[in-house]
Image (cartoon, rainbow, N blue to C red):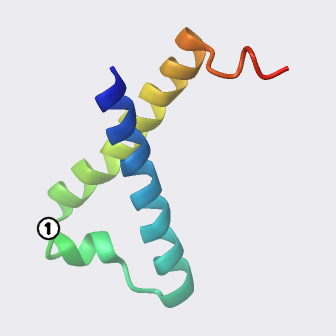
């Protein structure tokens, strides 16, 4: 569970950094890394959705912020 959560957080951080580079420069790192092969590009983008859903489940199931107040 812990490793999955760390991997999902890492993926979302990387995708966020790639999006920031694309927004600032117009260079799409992920598309360059997949050599323009759209099925692989879309599969990697879909991992962002899976990672976000996992983290949403983790936040609801384990309530890590419950004891902060």
> Residue 13, percent across and down?
46, 55
| Residue ID at (39%, 85%) | 27
| Residue ID at (46%, 86%) | 26
In the picture, the quarter occupied by the N terminus is top left
The crowd level at tag 1 (other Cα within 10 Å; few <14, some 14-19, many 20+) is few
Mark 1 sits on what residue? 37
Label 1 SS: loop
> Residue 64, percent across and down?
62, 20
- Left or right: where 40 falls relative to 15: left
Say which of 65 and 59 sits in front.
Answer: 65
Q: How many marks?
A: 1
Residue, far bottom: 25
- Left or right: where 61 falls relative to 3: right
In the picture, the quarter occupied by the C terminus is top right
| Residue ID at (47%, 68%) | 17
> Residue 52, percent across and down?
47, 36
- Left or right: where 35 falls relative to 9: left
For residue 14, what is the image quadrant?
Answer: bottom left
Residue, far top: 61
* In the rendered image, the vertical position of residue 65 relative to residue 23, given as above or below: above
Say which of 58 and 46 sits in front.
Answer: 58
């Amino acid at each position: 569970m812990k490793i999955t959560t760390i991997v999902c957080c890492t993926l979302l951080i990387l995708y966020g950094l790639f999006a920031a580079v694309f927004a600032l420069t117009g260079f799409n790192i992920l598309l360059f890394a997949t050599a323009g092969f759209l099925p692989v590009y879309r599969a990697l983008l879909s991992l962002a959705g899976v990672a976000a859903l996992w983290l949403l489940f983790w936040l609801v199931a384990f309530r890590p912020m419950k004891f902060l107040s």
